[in-house]
Amino acid sequence: MNQVILYTIISLSATGVAAAIILFLIAQRFRVIEDPRIDDVEDALPSANCGGCGYAGCRNFAEACVKAENMSGLFCPPGGNDTMANVAGILGMEALEQDPEVAVVRCSGSFACRPRTNQYDGATSCAVASSLYAGDTGCQWGCLGHGDCVRPCEFDAIHMNPETGLPEVVDEKCTACNACVEACPKDIIELRKRAKRDRKIFVSCINEDKGGIAKKSCSVACIGCGKCEKVCPHDAITIENFLAYIDPVKCKLCRKCPPVCPTNSIHEIGFPPRKPKPEPVAKTLEAGESDEPTKKEDKK
Amino acid sequence: MRTFRLGGIHPPDNKITAGSSIRELPVPEQVSIPIFQHIGAPPKILVERGAEIKVGEPIASSEGFISAFIHSSVSGKVIKIDKVTDISGYKRMAVVVKVDGDSWQDGIDRSPELKKEIKIEPQEIIQKVLQMGIVGMGGATFPTHVKLSLPRGKEADYLLVNGAECEPYLTSDHILMVERTNEILCGISIMMKALNVEKAIIGIENNKPDAIARLTECARDFKGIEVAGMKVKYPQGGEKQLIKTLIDREVPSGGLPIDVGAVVFNVGTMFAVYEAIQKNKPLIERVVTITGKDMKDPGNFMVRIGTPVSSLVEAAGGLPESTGKVISGGPMMGKALNSLDVPIIKGTSGVTLLPEAESSRKEIQNCIRCSKCVTVCPMGLEPYLLMALGEREMFERMEDDKAMDCIECGSCSYICPSNRPLLDYIRLGKVEINKLRRARKN
Amino acid sequence: MGFVTVSPSPHEHTQGSVPKLMYGVLIALLPAFLVSLYVFGIGALIITLTAMVSCLAFEYLIQKYLLKVTPSISDGSALITGILLAFCLPANLPIWLVILGSFVAIAVGKMSFGGLGNNPFNPALVGRVFLFISFPVQLTSWPEPIVNRLSYLDASTGATALATMKEGMKNSESIPEIMAGIPAYTDMFLGKISGSAGEIAAIALLLGLVYMLIRKIITWHIPVSIFLTVTLFTGILWLANPAKNPDPLFHLLSGGLMLGAIFMATDYVTSPMNTRGMLVYGVMIGIITVVIRVFGSYPEGVQFAILIMNAITPLINKYVKPRRFGERLEDG
């Protein structure tokens, strides 16, 4: 009995040693010599593999960085400027600063503002729905609400609000990786310059219908009236196809445009509450406004 | 009994309107004629707001090779050229005409008398088919003159005519075959001349014995036209399935019917060709089946292009209280409409109203891997796999698994015992694969 | 009229559903159950009911309290697992073993993979093989047919045809000698033999097959390819040496081959997804079964053959594709 155990131990150990030697030799023979800096760069990255840089994953991005002659065109949105400075340091190159950005949902057609006109009953996917038809409301531009933007987010930074049926971005978590922007078949989500204290002013609508049609389908649609364009002191607002757009670079966040918008489609977020002014602001407040908590606070 | 071999299903027939003869739908007060009525490039609009037009006057001319002319289906005044919700579910360009009387353009022969003698040459036929705005009327709306212009080096030896009408509910082709038999046969002869083929076969499913009998009888007077009865099986009217059934040839993956020497047309198109060539009448009206289990007076109507679906529904006794879904086309491949104001177009073979009880899909359950979707797929694909890949956005793998061969017949979604939206994701995959292919080319 | 519904085509759906298919299989199992009631009486009733109830209970409890999803026991799949498990157990098996087998079948074989549709192995077979390996004695003492209808645990036991055959071969007896101790083929066909509860009557199982084929619950490919392979393989052996090998009919009628080929190999979840794959799968099951029966140490091999092929099914699905339309056989 003892002998059997002994033989077993000896033979198994011998097999193990032999296998180890063979594996060692093979590993030596077929070793892939890689630039060690790739590992260093990869370690410096957030390893979220979100694809925001345009490469398949962090490893691919690291390889691209090591191969590149300068850092132009290489940027890791989740890591931001700090990470890129580290990466550039490892590679002995100059980092190119980029303004941090944040995803913004440009539709505020909640259930209350945008009445349903039919019932969608297909696969729960915005891509499927949008290839079928305009959507279950009168607005063919707006959010379909099936959450295609939520699924690809690696950072848990965008959620559907069941009360409004619209996605909401958590600014602190958003890394501007672009995944939701690409996922949205209606191109509603946009990356905009991230300002101090996450303040932002933007037109929360992409409806290019004529004012009357837009307003009929959604009470908070931009009707392209041009009031904001006139009031803007920085030439940041343009109107094209009955739709206002605020250029995030030109906009100085002066807060002149939101009060003049007759449909409340310009949102201002992250600002202290406005002081009550003698001007009849109340006139611009109309139905549907009650659905926007952020806006309500701002107006008060 | 003739039929295709691979896959196929037997959905309930529901041909409520079979045998109800074609009625003329009164011209509505206003029509919106969409510019997008066919596959290919949108045509160029020829009229301006305020213009007075007559029936049959061209209002848009084809732009590029794969495109088609569009003619006014009414006489009156163009009141606007604007975006109108059409069958795509989106607002797209259309010419809106306020109807005033019914005066036709000169040169259009509106008499019912049959003109059998074909006087013009093949090249002229193709030219005329283009100018008369003829497109495939089975639903795909592919411009007919493109099919007639065979690629260099390819030759057709069979002209196949699709009278299968395998789609449940619809009977517009059926009634056309019964009531316009000689016109269709004459249209086929014209197409045979244009394509320089000796043999034509009309494939009709056996649930239309009157159409088979009538066509067989009349076909004796025409040279080279054979009428073939086919076993009832969906999707027999699919182009590739029809070719397999009638001449036992399989169009290779990614290929066209001409690759196996066949050209396929719908019977409706043959009638339109006859009218265009022999009567000089552009494609401005078509037979549309309006049907539904709860409809008061369902039937087959001759409808001017651009007529809103609501007028058709009115003519058939009004919208039933129970309506839950309005489909342009039949229930298998038709498109659900989000509004009754959508205009009838050249490809609208019917409007089917489903009661509320039949409108919603059932709850989706786990795939139990029963392989029924694979068994019924007429293209030999694996829908369960394609859907899983589509959900995970693995479009390259979908392409490797031949997703582009899918003919979107819906047999897989129909048969799935777990009510899974198989076709939804396959269709999505096809769109994405097309994008990938375009990106690869550039 | 409310809002119209808009959805992608098709807008029509078959009346078929998962429960309908599953209850169809249950109906197909009915003849075999009746025969087992006739042959083994109260024992068959006890183990079948126990297995069905415990499978349902385990599925319900696991879904409700562990997975916290809406229990889906009404779809009938747990019932089938229960019946199939009972059908390949001896009718005199103690109740606690049946319950243990049901637990392994449902908890380990099915739910641990995510429930119906996700299990790689046939749950009933997982339960049965677990019991077979853990409790070989209890699993290989079958009650005598007909005589024990009113006794359950204290039934007198007999040997199955396959066990007799294996035993005889071990003792180098010739086939005619062994055959003398084996019931006549007509008895085997009608089920008047000793064996597991549901596997004994070929005729009842074939009736079930015909029903499932007519209702289009399954296709012919798997069972027929198994039968043909077994016939062919054992036929060759028999022709080569009739003194040492029993004829193909013996193999077809004995043991769990019919039950396995008709009801277990055809399990939707664990069998290949297209007819070409099904043929490969069936042929391989046939070969492995015969190899185990003839050359292995176990008298019966169907269950192992099916489990082995279950493991290979994903590979078959990956490499054996259906015949695509337009794929030309002659020019590849």
Image: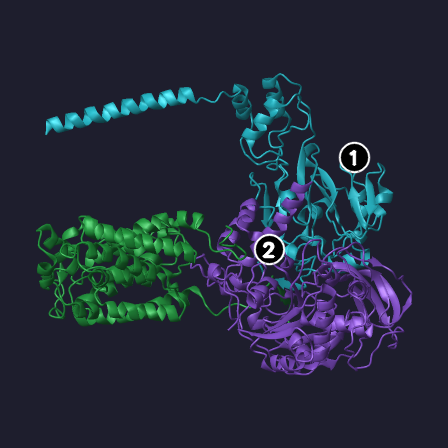
Chain colours: A cyan, B purple, C green
Which is more foreground, mark 1 or mark 2?
Answer: 2
Which kind of residue does numbered mark 1 sit on? Lys
The residue indicated by pointer 2 is B427
Picture quadrant where residue B80 is located = bottom right
Q: Mark on residue B160?
A: none
Q: SS class of the residue under badge 2?
A: helix
Picture quadrant where residue B360 is located = bottom right
Q: Where is residue A132 in the image (x, y as percent from the top left)?
A: 65, 58
Residue nearest the observer in this picture, A224 or B81: B81
Whether labels 1 and 2 share one chain = no
Residue B344, compared with residue B406, is above or below; it is below
Residue C215, compared with residue B388, is above or below; it is below
Image-based side of B263 in relation to B285, left or right: left
Q: Mark on residue A252?
A: 1
| Callout 2 crowding tier (Cα within 10 Å): few <14, some 14–19, many ≥20 | many
Q: Position of residue B46 (x, y in %)?
A: 87, 60
Image-based side of A208 in relation to A58, left or right: right
Look at the image and tell me whether residue A184 can be seen.
yes
Residue appearing at x 52%, y 25% in the figure: A43
Residue appearing at x 82%, y 38% in the figure: A236
